[in-house]
Image (cartoon, helix red, strand yellow):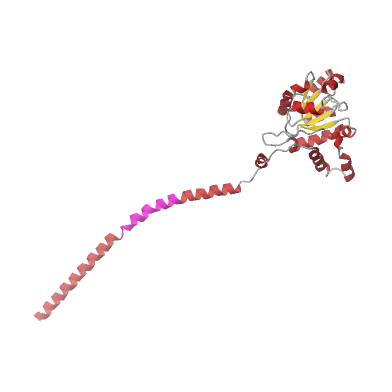
Amino acid sequence: MGNWTSDTYQKEDEEASDGEGEGDTEVMQQETVPVPVPSEKTKQPKECFLIQPKERKENTTKTRKRRKKKITDVLAKSEPKPGLPEDLQKLMKDYYSSRRSVIELEELNLPDSCFLKANDLTHSLSSYLKEICPKWVKLRKNHSEKKSVLMLIICSSAIRALELIRSMTAFRGDGKVIKLFAKHIKVQAQVKLLEKRVVHLGVGTPGRIKELVKQGGLNLNPLKFLVFDWNWRDQKLRRMMDIPEIRKEVFELLEMGVLSLCKSESLKLGLF
């Protein structure tokens, strides 16, 4: 009985000692488990910080890919080419093709003899006008008809018209020049000016010149030279005939007696 009791006590002591060891390991495990948790939390903002610039780079590359080339970008890289009579003939054909029959289109073709030598981009306005009209002084002295001009220079805007007037001083001499554009000038004021005195040169836009012809303020029959400011480009690199409104007004003006004067060879066309 006493032996059994002692063995039992010994086993109980061993079991108790074993139980105490297990409890210690559990406590140690509980203390070591939370250790990696804060390290994972510190990594999270770093991952978010790295993702953001990648998204921005992808967005910037997408916007660059979507950008399309503009006409001005293409024209800026291309070399300027001087205008030729064939260019005007082609534009006329394209404009009238939907409005005229085949027979009427053939009648619109202008003979080569009605075209003056085109500007090769080496001339100033004065030097070009001297080349195409070497007898200007004689023509100017013999001109005495009011409500008319000997030479018309057509451009795209009022500002450009003023630039052309300033640049032709060496050519015009004592010739009288009239501004034929709509900016700050009424039609009736221009009609009265043409009725009052003899004018040799007119510089302006096709819309205002067309209106003056329509109202009877400007007679085109004495006209000897019609010069287009063909090669000059504006800030958007557009020539006057690249602008739809200007192109339309030019062709409407040509139908108001200009084409018939060209075919009769009393009027010459020039592309500056």
Instruction: Provide the major secondary structure of the magenta segment.
Output: helix
Query: Considering only vertical position in the picture, is 28 above or below 213?
Result: below
* Front residue (pair 67, 222): 222
Is residue 123 rendered magenta in the image? no
x and y, in percent, of residue 236 in the image: 67, 36
- In the image, taking residue 44 as reference, residue 268 lies left or right, namely right
* Front residue (pair 48, 172): 172
**Start and end of the magenta stretch?**
33-50
- Quarter of the picture containing the C terminus is top right
Q: Quadrant of residue 129?
A: top right
Query: Considering only vertical position in the picture, is 167 above or below 33?
Result: above
Q: Residue furthest bottom?
A: 1
Q: Is residue 212 visible?
A: yes
Q: Quadrant of residue 248?
A: top right
Is residue 37 rendered magenta in the image? yes
In percent of the image, x 79 and y 39: which residue is there? Answer: 87
x and y, in percent, of residue 256 in the image: 86, 33
Q: Quadrant of residue 186?
A: top right
Q: Is residue 181 visible?
A: no
In percent of the image, x 10 and y 80: which residue is there? Answer: 3
Query: Considering only vertical position in the picture, is 46 above or below 205?
Result: below
x and y, in percent, of residue 172 in the image: 78, 22
- Quarter of the picture containing the N terminus is bottom left
